[in-house]
Image (cartoon, grey):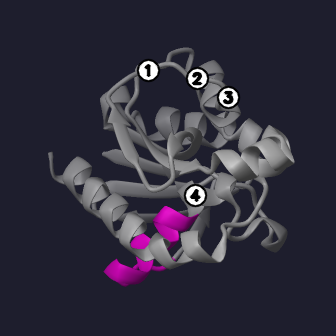
């Protein structure tokens, strides 16, 4: 059993914000794979074969609770979890996979680390960096800001690459 988790904030006011890159990635994946969302453990979720896809509905900084529920209930090995999140320190559009690692200031990953009592699970970071806008808004407002028109135009290509990484993870 594998678990693919996209991080984001619930509610329409957060749609297309940088912090919802994990939700965007899974929603794009679902459209391209003709999958439908349901619900499980208070999360937006879908099981497809031996894979659970999950969008925790706690706010970003509390994502660990839902992840831990799936891991414990289905006895999912740490190596079979993939968490997809934003990273404003990465150049916009850059995708970085790590099999383990530190939260690096990402509060969603910190929450997952706390609930799983480890950071030894794979994560895929989507670069949302825009230094000019980040300096103007500050970190908190930046992660909650929407993508610029130029960035939005590039999202389908970026999210398509993330989808390829998801498929690779599932098939490894």
Question: Image point 43% across, 75% down: which residue?
Answer: 156
List x then y, in percent, for residue 152.
57, 74
The number of numbered badges drawn on the structure is: 4
Q: Earlier in the sequence, mark 2 or mark 3?
A: 2
Question: Image point 70% across, 56% down: which residue?
Answer: 42
Mark-to-mark CA distance, 2 and 1: 8 Å
Q: Is residue 52 above or below residue 124?
A: below
Question: Dot 2: within a 10 Å radius of its alpha carbon, few (fewer than 14), some, or many (20 or more) residues?
Answer: few
Q: Earlier in the sequence, mark 4 or mark 3?
A: 4
Q: Are marks 4 and 3 in contact (CB under 8 Å)?
A: no
Q: Is residue 104 above or below residue 149?
A: above
Mark-to-mark CA distance, 3 and 1: 14 Å
Q: Which residue is mark 3?
A: 111
Question: Image point 61% across, 66% down: which residue?
Answer: 39
Q: Which residue is mark 4?
A: 21
Boundaries of the magenta span: 24-36
List x then y, in percent, for residue 159.
41, 66
Q: Which mark is residue 4?
A: none
Q: Nearer the viewer, mark 4 or mark 3?
A: 4
Q: Which residue is mark 1?
A: 101
Q: Which residue is mark 2?
A: 104
Q: Are marks 2 and 1 in contact (CB under 8 Å)?
A: yes
Depth check, front residue: 33 or 162: 162
Q: Quadrant of residue 164?
A: bottom left
For label 2, the SS is loop
Q: Is residue 165 above or below residue 29?
A: above
Is residue 153 highlighted in magenta? Answer: no
Mark-to-mark CA distance, 2 and 3: 12 Å
Q: Which secondary structure is most common in the magenta stretch?
A: helix
Q: Earlier in the sequence, mark 3 or mark 1?
A: 1
Q: Is residue 40 above or below residue 110?
A: below
For label 4, the SS is helix
């Amino acid at each position: 059993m594998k678990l693919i988790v996209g991080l984001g904030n619930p509610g329409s006011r957060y749609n297309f914000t940088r912090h919802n890159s994990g939700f965007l990635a899974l929603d794009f994946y679902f459209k391209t794979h003709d999958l439908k969302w349901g619900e499980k453990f208070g999360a937006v979720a879908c099981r497809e074969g031996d894979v659970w896809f999950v969008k925790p509905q706690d706010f970003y900084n509390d994502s660990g609770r839902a992840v831990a529920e799936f891991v414990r209930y289905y006895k999912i090995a740490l190596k079979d979890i993939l968490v997809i999140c934003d990273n404003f320190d990465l150049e916009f559009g850059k995708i970085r996979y790590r099999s383990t690692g530190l939260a690096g200031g990402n509060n969603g990953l910190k929450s997952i680390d706390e609930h799983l009592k480890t950071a030894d699970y794979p994560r895929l970071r989507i670069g949302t960096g825009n230094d000019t806008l980040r300096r103007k808004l500050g970190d908190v407002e930046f992660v909650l800001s929407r993508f610029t028109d130029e960035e939005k135009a590039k999202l389908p290509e970026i999210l398509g690459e993330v989808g390829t990484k998801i498929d690779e993870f599932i098939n490894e």
